Image (spheres, helix red, strand yellow):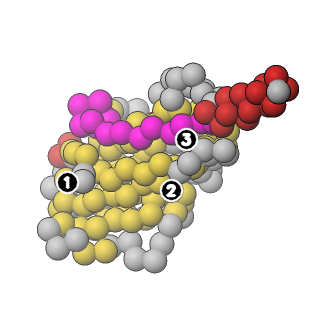
Amino acid sequence: MVTLAVLIYAVWKDFWMRPKLLLSFENDRDVKKQDNTVGLSSPSIRSTWLRVHVTNRKGRRVAKNCRAYLVGIAKLPEREDVFPNDVRQMYWMHDDPQARPGARDLLPGVAHWIDVAGAIEGDPLLKVCVSPPWALKSPGEYVFTIQVSAEEAVPASVKVRGTWDGRWHSLRGDPFG
């Protein structure tokens, strides 16, 4: 009887210690204006980045091989699908934009960010941070749907509304839905 109780405890404990992915977005925390952006032709070019905050819940096992995917873009107010029939892997903040997007192991409670979109000074396009590359050509309001997965974790998703008027410093975001 004790052996059975120990076995049940071990199985349940293992189940409850699985990684738990938490995705969130806050404009003040997750929209960054910056100089000296990796991958741009000149360090003096300024840019604004829309990012999604990702953590693995404290007290859980490491979330191994965590990857992020863009699964949809809709243009508001009509909710026009501008990214039809497509799913693309996304870049983590400060990944080399010349390389393929990679996977990360997320320690419990440590914050990471996924680059969603970037507005770059002097560039008329809104760069969507996916591989292969993608860009939005017209200013407006867009809803980005992002899904993140990791070994032994239930995939998590988030929707972020990005607003851009065509200028590099105008990019803003809000949680959507």
Find residue 29 and report its image quarter. Answer: top left
Element at label 1: strand
> In screen coordinates, is 2 left or right of 41?
right
Label 2 vs 1, first from the N-terminus: 2
Label 3 vs 2, first from the N-terminus: 2
Q: Residue at label 3?
A: 95
Q: Which residue type carries mark 3?
A: Asp
Identified at 23% across, 31% down, the residue is 28
Q: Which residue type carries mark 2?
A: Tyr
Q: Foreground residue, 4 or 144?
A: 4
Question: In whole angstroms, how far apart are the C-alphas of marks 2 and 1?
Answer: 21 Å
Question: In whole angstroms, how far apart are the C-alphas of marks 1 and 3?
Answer: 23 Å
Instruction: Estimate the x, y position of residue 40 in percent, counting from the top left.
Output: 44, 44
Magenta region: which residues? 18-32
Instruction: Estimate the x, y position of residue 132 in percent, counting from the top left.
Output: 54, 64
Q: Foreground residue, 109 or 91?
A: 109
Asked if marks 1 and 3 touch (Cβ < 8 Å), the reply is: no
**Disc 2 versus disc 1: nearer the observer:** 2
Instruction: Estimate the x, y position of residue 156 in percent, counting from the top left.
Output: 47, 48
Question: In whole angstroms, how far apart are the C-alphas of marks 3 and 2?
Answer: 15 Å
How busy is the neighbourhood of tag 2: few (under 14 within 10 Å), some, or many (20 plus)? many
Element at label 3: loop
Outermost residue to the right: 3
Identified at 18% across, 66% down, the residue is 76
Q: Residue at label 2?
A: 69
